[in-house]
């Protein structure tokens, strides 16, 4: 693997395309610390850092596979972009909780559904009010903890915009939106611990 250190990433990609498959392993080893750093700075609902690292590695593999040297970007820039997009995509999918209705179904077969429905109804009115009050309290704490800019970014993020779209709409750099999302995550964690 040391023999590859004398070549640029772009040269290595050309060599990889000409059949030297071990170069892919070299590039993965070279950039896995960048993947770990980016993954540790993010939060995946219902997952952990290892899940994000795995997603980041998928982004790195895509970068190695799809890089084209006829574009203006260096491989490093392209790899960073692919990794970040894969991480943000994983977080977005996680936040949607797409399959939530499937996980909270009630069986309608037999008489047991009547019992389940009755139990849910008996505890629901009071618990709904308590849950709403708790939710409103958490939302207020989060809103108060965030700056006006962070509140706008959070609102757009929760509406499904990714950080690149938010940056374009707010006429800011992608990096400033990424930094704002990192601060938001940190502040939200603090609010949730109270």
Image (cartoon, helix red, strand yellow):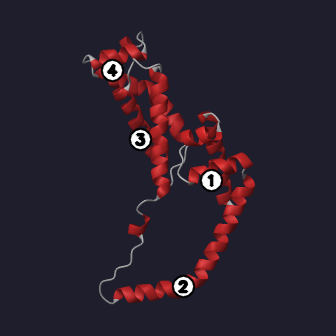
Reading the image, the residue beneath label 2 is 123
Q: Which of the marked residues, 2 or 3, is nearer the chain's N terminus? A: 3
Q: Secondary structure under badge 2?
A: helix
Separation of marks 2 and 3 at Cα, in angstroms:
41 Å
Point out which mark residue 23 bears.
4
Please determine whether, in this image, residue 70 is positioned above or below residue 192.
above
Point out which mark residue 54 bears.
3
Residue at 28% from the left image edge and 19% from the top image edge:
17
Q: Nearer the viewer, mark 3 or mark 1?
A: 1
> To which quarter of the image does residue 18 belong?
top left
Report crowding for label 4: few under 14, some 14 to 19, many 20 or more residues within 10 A (C-alpha).
many
Reading the image, the residue beneath label 1 is 155
Please determine whether, in this image, residue 184 is positioned above or below residue 71.
below
Assess whether mark 2 and mark 1 are in contact (beta carbons under 8 angstroms).
no
Q: Which of the marked residues, 3 or 1, is nearer the chain's N terminus? A: 3
Assess whether mark 3 and mark 2 are in contact (beta carbons under 8 angstroms).
no
């Amino acid at each position: 693997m040391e023999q590859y250190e004398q070549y640029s990433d772009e040269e290595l990609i050309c060599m990889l395309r000409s059949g030297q498959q071990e170069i892919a392993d070299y590039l993965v080893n070279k950039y896995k610390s960048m993947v770990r750093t980016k993954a540790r700075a993010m939060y995946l609902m219902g997952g952990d850092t290892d899940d994000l690292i795995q997603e980041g590695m998928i982004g790195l593999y895509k970068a190695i596979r799809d890089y084209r040297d006829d574009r203006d970007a260096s491989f490093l820039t392209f790899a960073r972009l692919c990794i970040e997009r894969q991480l943000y995509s994983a977080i977005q999918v996680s936040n949607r909780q797409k399959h939530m209705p499937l996980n909270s179904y009630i069986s309608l077969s037999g008489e047991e559904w009547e019992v389940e429905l009755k139990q849910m109804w008996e505890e629901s009115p009071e618990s709904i009010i308590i849950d709403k009050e708790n939710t409103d309290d958490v939302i207020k704490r989060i809103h108060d903890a965030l700056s006006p800019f962070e509140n706008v970014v959070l609102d757009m993020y929760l509406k499904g915009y990714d950080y690149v779209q938010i940056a374009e709409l707010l006429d800011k750099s992608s990096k400033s939106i990424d930094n704002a999302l990192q601060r938001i995550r940190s502040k939200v964690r603090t609010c949730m611990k109270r």
